[in-house]
Amino acid sequence: MATPSRQVSPHANGVSPRAYAAQNTRPQNTFRGCSRITDYEVLGKLGEGTFGEVHRARSKKTGAIVALKKILMHNEKDGFPITALREIKLLKLLSHPNILKLEEMAVESHQKSTDKRKRAIMYMVTPYMDHDLSGLLENPAIKFTEPQIKCYMLQLLEGLRYLHDNRILHRDMKAANLLINNKGILQIADFGLARHYDEPVPVAGHGGGEARRDYTTLVVTRWYRPPELLLHLRKYTTAIDLWGVGCVFGEMLIGKPILAGESDQNQLKIIFDLVGTPTEENMPGWRSLPGAEGLNIPPRPPSLSQRFRQFGSGAISLLSELLKLDWRKRINAIDALQHPYFRDSPLPAKAGDLPTFEESHELDRRKFRGQKAAPPPAPKGGTVGMGPNGGQGGWGGEAGGGGNPGYGNDNYGGYRPHQNGSRYPHAGHRGIPPSEGRRPAWQRDDRPDTRLPPRPPPVAGDQLAYDGGRSDGRDGYRSRSRDLDRERALPRSRGGAPNVDTYIPSYGPDSSRPPREDRSRDDRRRRDDRDRDRLDYDDRSRSGRTRSRSRSPTRERDRERAREREPLDRDREREIYRR
Ligand SMILES: Nc1ncnc2c1ncn2[C@@H]1O[C@H](COP(=O)(O)OP(=O)(O)OP(=O)(O)O)[C@@H](O)[C@H]1O
């Protein structure tokens, strides 16, 4: 099994990120630096993430097939995106077989351009991986075996142990960020939300421990977000990543996301349906978390053992440890690697013995849509964060039960099939010819982002209720004003920032933004807005600027506009990096 090839020494508290990076940069020979984009022959597009397009390419020097992640400059005047800076800085520090390696940066300059203001385009160069886990799980022809799941789980936990041992929180653990190649190697990717962790590293037998400082709660894709984050715990720990591992484990077992919430409240509800409602015994202190204020949760026993009974006691035991409500007691990566599940028969497969599959990436998923026997649902905003409304996504299918036995119960709200029987809108919405659908994304030159599906009607709301008239509306959407009320009630960071997801795109009713898979290029402007929100959120705590407690949507909009005009200086960037 994979072992760390090089351990980066944990930095002592108080050392600046710059000093830490200087002390810990991986050996020069493992990072080549910067080359020109003309050194690569671009073969086709693999995916389009929030912060950049990803292309498949061949190195003209070495012949190696690589992935080029283009760093989108949504807002030229803001300079290099902070998320990309973070990702590059962290990846340069890391070296482990289960962490995607940053080989070098490639630059596309505009030497011939007469416009001097035009900036160079930067690309991150990483080894090409044949699949992401989410894409593999959507392929109806692929059924994971138990030894295969154990093999991927061990690699995932090895990678995470390495990260946590080196004081790095990933903060966006999800199937789409786990890349797999046809040699059976799994690598953790997408460090855009990762950061240094200013606490002691996890030790065997002690879960994730407790944190002393506050971190932003605006992290982790909703479906993979742990209950303590949904309840706005700011002193969170490495345990947030282990919750995500639990979600990914369950997803590999049943073949689709296990906790596909449609809003943050609905996410909490389906979590509690699965693992039981919180009490002072199973989640000490939960009542005093900011997000628990006014929550009325009818007691419910856990259903996890029943729902996963077909996978045996070993799998149920590991899943229960990973999905423990008490973040202090949630199993850490060191202990999870020693779990009896991995020693029980059938034993984990060896990576090299796993079968190979046809490539599947973000753009390839279209070809699997409509082919699944058991219809999976449409996501309702299954992307990073909840947006200011914390509402459900605006796109997806009509309400209805999911197809998987024991899952997809409509009462859980998270699993609703799309009309085409897919998690995502039918490929037909995008007019992809059937023959095209069989070719890997990088061989096609069509673009998925210009033909969006019609917006479906809203679905039923949650059962969890906030008091004081702040509960979701009947249609499951929260009104903006209610959200503002709720923001006011929430505790604020030092600078007065309310503890809400201000930098995350909203897929709520007042957003026309589709979920990630259906994103249009034209919505980059909205991404710009989101980036500005992100910067603004982080900046407020430093500058001491506070938001007025007497908010109104109009004043809020004016403030947004004012903020848009503010330039981002280097100090702000540095401070944002520290959050
Ligand atoms: N090295 C790689 N090899 C093959 N495919 C890759 C590679 N890196 C990324 N991809 C594909 O591109 C997609 C987007 O990549 P990534 O998650 O790094 O971008 P992002 O902009 O950070 O996305 P997100 O919206 O999830 O934050 C991945 O889900 C994967 O399908």
Image (cartoon, rainbow, N blue to C red):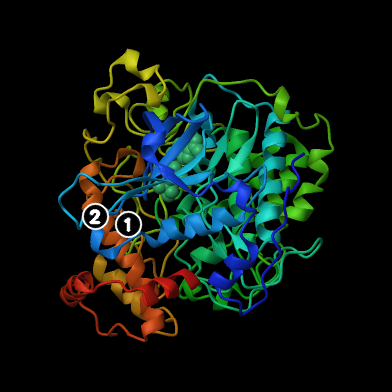
103 versus 332 height, above or below: above
Q: Quadrant of residue 289?
A: bottom right
90 versus 43 height, above or below: below
Is the shortest distance between ligand 1 and the CB of mark 2 under 8 Å? no
Q: Percent position (x, y) of residue 33?
A: 50, 49
Q: Residue at x 67, y 61 (%)?
A: 166
Number of the label disc, if any, that sits on residue 526: 2
Q: Residue at x 63, y 27 (%)?
A: 144
* Element assignment for label 2: helix
- The amino acid pointed to by label 1 is Pro
- Residue receiving disc 1: 505
Callout 2: 10 Å neighbours few (<14), some, many (20+)? some
Q: Residue at x 67, y 59 (%)?
A: 164
Contact, mark 2 vs mark 1 (Cβ under 8 Å): yes
- The answer to whether residue 463 shows anywhere in this view is no
Q: Is residue 480 left or right of residue 219?
A: left
324, 174: nearer the viewer: 174
Q: Percent position (x, y) of residue 363?
A: 38, 31
Q: Percent position (x, y) of residue 317?
A: 75, 47
197, 139: nearer the viewer: 197
Instruction: Indicate the quadrant of ligand 1 in the picture.
Output: top left
